[in-house]
Image: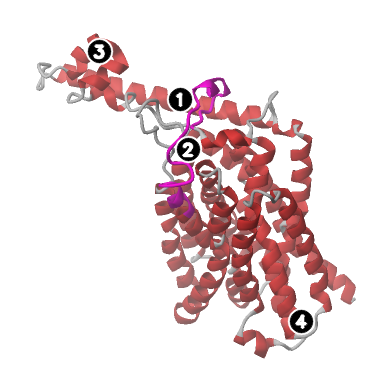
Amino acid sequence: MYTSHEDIRYDFEDDPKDKKTLKPHPDMDGGWAWMMVVSSFFVHILVMGSQMALGVLNVEWLEEFHQSRGLTAWVSSLSMGITLIVGPFIGLFINTCGCRRTAIIGGLVNSLGWVLSAYAANVHYLFITFGVAAGFGSGMAYLPAVVMVGRYFQKRRALAQGLSTTGTGFGTFLMTVLLKYLCAEYGWRNAMFIQGAVSLNLCVCGALMRPLSPGKDGHGPEMGDPTVLPAHSVESVGSAGHPGRAEKEGGPGHEEALGDPQAPRCGEPGRRDARTLRVLKAVSQLTLSVRRGFRDWYSGYFGTASLFTNRMFVAFVLWALFAYSSFVIPFIHLPEIVNLYNLSEQNDIFPLTSIIAIVHIFGKVVLGVVADLPCISVWNVFLMANFTLVISIFLLPLAHTYAGLASVCALIGFSSGYFSLMPVVTEDLVGIEHLASAYGIIICANGISALLGPPFAGKLSEVLRA
């Protein structure tokens, strides 16, 4: 039912029946593949980094709207949660529109959400503009960034994913500094407006996500993106200067009708017919693409080839329902812990959240390198790091000094680097063909964890103190 992960070094098509046409692809593990890493890196900076820095804006919203901490915290939780929860629906966009178009549209929606939030009159307005709109746009940009790296790498897949996801750590550090500066200089409303303009760079990142091109021999259509058409499809219908492509599309007679230099250049009927045919061809191709994308998406979730028939994958989803909160909770509640133990002076010199972010970068790279070693199982690295992170979360409330908290935060940062291995182990479970849909489910589970984890931890803290 599932494609072996060994097949990802080849070109692939959406239809499993075409697997016999698979062949080696020159762009795998090199060339443009590293541009995928760069693109994904900046997506993580702009999306995940910005969300990890929302504590800065949370303080501004508390002062502006005078609402409870719990209600105000839901703005950040909604944005972070929806970014991940919409994963399965973004998988449908990827199947029908392709990764490039999905990421570009996501960049536009995310930017619009930031800009509209600058005009918020109350917290409930932010629920819609920032929590829902900006969160949905972030999800549309985030999932393609992860999927495209998986499509372009086979030998150094874990390292590539590790390098690209280090953008979260860099972004947390950079965006925190940027938002603090913008809020201090221009106020939080103008800061959000400026951040909306910065988020338009997601469209640039999306433009870099080109599908896998044909092999060096030049045979076969592009197969890396479900909506990419062969060179002799839509464009060839009216290509007067390229009779060869027209011949491929419609035969010699078609070439005479549309590509003959002797065809009437001023005769509007001929030109109108060509334009009409070109439009009809484009609509037909788009309709077929949407139908095929929806069919693949539906079969992956509900059909006979449903991912949920894979028991290991189901267990992995259940784990993901709780996993992400272990990483999010420290970022939300560390400021309160610092105030509780009167450590604000030391924390202002070097924030504990910055320690997590910086060590998180090294953790992703180191764990990625280790997981790619031939004698090491990626699953062993993944499980050991996950166990270490859980232990670190339990140790956090026991540390009452800055040095103790800094040590635990460093351990949290390093062990949480295993999140870069999640696309790798997901692909190992279901194969590259189902990666977009499967990883969409995984990040949806993570989104539920991120949405409910921090409020639950805050409520538990209040109960224990009482």
Which stretch appears magenta? 11-37
Coloring scheme used: secondary structure
**Residue 312, can we see it?**
yes
Q: Are marks 1 and 2 in contact (CB under 8 Å)?
A: no
Q: Is residue 112 above or below residue 261?
A: below
Separation (CA) of disc 4 from disc 1: 59 Å
The image's mark for residue 404 is 4
User: What amino acid is found at the position of numbered circle 1 in the picture?
Assistant: Thr
User: What amino acid is found at the position of numbered circle 4 in the picture?
Assistant: Gly
Image quadrant where residue 466 sits: bottom right
In the image, residue 251 lies at what x, y percent?
A: 28, 11
Q: Is residue 225 magenta?
A: no
Task: Name the residue that disc number 2 marks.
Answer: 98
Separation (CA) of disc 3 from disc 4: 76 Å
The image's mark for residue 287 is 1
1 or 2: tag closer to the N-terminus: 2
Separation (CA) of disc 2 from disc 3: 30 Å
Task: Name the residue that disc number 3 marks.
Answer: 254
